[in-house]
Amino acid sequence: MAQEMAECEAHGTPTLLRCAEADCGRPICPQCLVKTPVGLKCEEHAQAVEARFDRRAKPLALVAAALVAVAGIMLTVVLFNRGSATTTAPDDTPAPAASGVPSTRIVPASVYVVNVDGSEARTLTNRPLAFDARPAWSPDGSRIAFESTVDGRRSVWVMQADGQALRRLTDAAGASSETGPAWSPAGDRIAFASDRDGNAEIYSVAVDGSGIRRLTNSPAADAFPAWSPDGARIAFLSDRDGQQAIWVMAADGASPNRLVAGAAAEGARPTWSPDGRQVAFASDRDGNLDVYVADVGAATATATRLLAGPGLDGEPAWSPDGSRLAFASDRDGAPQIYVANRDGSNVVKITFKARSFTPAWAPDGRRLVYIYDPVPGG
């Protein structure tokens, strides 16, 4: 049954939103709602939980505590927000204080698309109550999957590549969350992380929303799946042996193995090279957040640093032809999207709004999708 419009008690604003607290259900509007790790709440009940979606918190620790929602709206790496929080954004976007919006209120983050030369950046999603994040292009280039909190629950959505025909793919029940969508090479399934069964695990679902399959079953926290180009394997982030690291398993969840010794960064999202021979990821193993690559299938795989500062580099994404990497970096003072040759040379900034994150390539290699999040901690 559809939710009926009601007036917010505090402001008299017509709204469909309700406090998620059991036995409350109070109408809440954008002026008074508070986003918490367990849904939208009125100010009274938000005080009983951690009232801030703080993307500077540790992603896997939150996932392990059944807070995948928080990890989903964070940067892939915690250090980006810590580094940018004290930096003036080279951008015309008003700061939270200037607009009078407290950081606990819903502030939109939107999916953008830009040409790889930095031209023609435009918004694909712009929904006032949504935090749209982690976009992923379908193999045929016709659709984009992403995660969203448009109704207070973090679920996976799919839209056309032009931003039209948005539809929910997964339905996070209660306080559970679905995050980090990744397309299979055939384009028929999408992998994602969810705590729907009480723990953060990897699942996959058909593109029509049917046939959800649980792929991992571990007491640890598993997140950020990435399908290999041949569709046979999935790389993911896990702390199942006590340290956050990149793991690889068969596409059906069998035979999980740690890819390489040493830690990955908090929330590091793995990405496969187009030939399937390497996986790139972010790590601060040498004291600074940089992009590393490891060979898949090597008897004694080692991590080789591919991109190194200045600043903090993370969230790598291989170009379709394997010649370049897109990544996020605060090397110019605030997080932006950059593109570099795969050997780390010829680094070019392609976005010009501070706080741009999570790049993903179009299959034709000519465009990138990413998110623009105007407000730190928003």
Image (tube, rainbow, N blue to C red):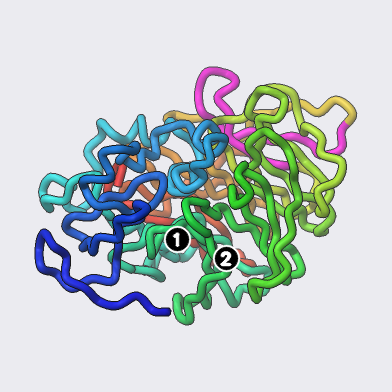
Whole-number angstrom distance, CA of label 2 to CA of label 1: 11 Å
Q: Nearer the viewer, residue 188 or 215?
A: 215
Determine the secondary structure under disc 1. Answer: strand
Q: Nearer the viewer, residue 325 or 224?
A: 224
Left/right placement of residue 24 relative to residue 254 reads left
Place of residue 268 in the rendered image (x, y in percent of width and height, measured from the top left)? 58, 38
The answer, for residue 352, to whether it is visible in the render is no
Q: Amino acid under label 2?
A: Thr
Q: Which mark is residue 148?
A: 1
Instruction: Tell me which corner region of the image, top left, top right, bottom left or bottom right, holds residue 308.
Output: top right
Instruction: Tell me which corner region of the image, top left, top right, bottom left or bottom right, holds residue 1.
Output: bottom left
Location of mark 2 (residue): 170
Crowding at dot 1, Cα within 10 Å, few <14 / some 14-19 / many 20+, comes out as many
Task: Point out the stretch of residues depicted in magenta.
Answer: 279-298
Q: Amino acid under label 1?
A: Ser
> In this view, which residue lies farthest toward the front?
23
The answer, for residue 18, to whether it is visible in the render is yes
Q: Is residue 37 above or below residue 155?
A: above
Closer to the chain start, of discs 2 and 1, is 1
Left/right placement of residue 226 relative to residue 114 reads right
Give yes or no for residue 292 being in the magenta stretch.
Answer: yes
Place of residue 175 in the rendered image (x, y in percent of width and height, measured from the top left)? 47, 51
> In this view, which residue lies farthest toward the right?
299
Crowding at dot 2, Cα within 10 Å, few <14 / some 14-19 / many 20+, comes out as many
Residue at 61% in and 73% down: 141
